[in-house]
Amino acid sequence: MDLQTVTVLTLAGLLLIVTFKLGSRDFFLEQVAPQGTRLQSWAWWFVVQGITGFAIPVLILMVGFRQRPAAIGLGLGDWKLAIILFVLYLPIVIIGTWVLSDGQLFQAEYPHYRGAAESWSVFAAYHALFLFYWMGWEYLWRGFILFGTARTFGLHAIFVQAVPFALMHMQKPTSELLLSLVGGVVLGALVWRCRAFWIAVPIHSVQMLALDFWCSLRIRTGASGFGIDALRTAFTGI
């Protein structure tokens, strides 16, 4: 058995456990800062995810297994293709999240921190902090597992990271759960093709940003439907 592959798959599970236990918002408010705010508890979760999903995995691969940055998805890769695909993806995600945001299940779920729907300054701070989370979340799957197991599984590493990634969405609305499986495969394939995990961060983060933005507008204004009238009503909430 390949030591790196065994280590990566084992530690990926352990790091998820640590993230959900020590990085939870309840743990922060009960054990770390009983007088802390809910926004601070979200910041705690985001930073812990950044450490357990990005910082620690990178150290393991680079220091423990002496991997070069480019070999584990940290190089620039095919950045021109990545930018082109991101630009093409933007209108799709903006329109798609507008449609999804019309569902009550999505408005009940997003933004995760409800204070972000009530204040645009809080919304901006919340999403700025969210970037720590995206770095850790994306690298865990599309970096640590994808490139960390590539020499054992080859191209099949795309599916090795996509299946558990989808299972982590089991509590989400059904449409999001199904999309997470497709998205996990597509993002894995994109990162594999570009040889850099960075492209997954703006793609996933802008998806969340757009969904939170639309849901916040709908929550504020009660806008429903997909047409121009609904869009006009939603924008009165800015």
Image (cartoon, grey):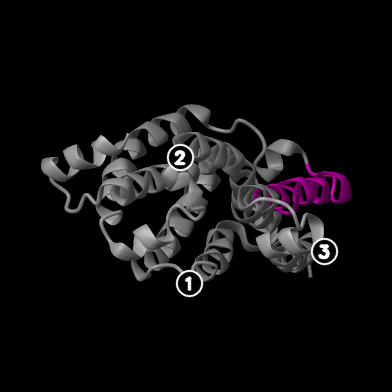
Which residue extends farthest right?
A: 64
Q: Amino acid at mark 2?
A: Ser
Give the residue number, with chain letter if any, for mark 2. Answer: 119
The residue at the point 45 percent across, 36 percent down is 120
Mark 2 burial class by Cα count in 10 Å: few <14, some 14-19, many 20+: few
- Residue 226 higher or lower than 185, as above or below: above
Residue 227 in percent (x, y) is at 13, 45
Q: Which residues are magenta?
A: 46-67
Q: Is residue 50 magenta?
A: yes
The quarter of the picture where residue 201 lies is top right
Pointer 1 residue: 171
Question: Where's residue 153, x and y in %?
Answer: 63, 63
Q: Which mark is residue 160?
A: none
- Which residue is nearer to you in this view: 100 or 136? 100
Return the residue at label 3.
Answer: 3
> Disc 1 marks which amino acid?
Gln
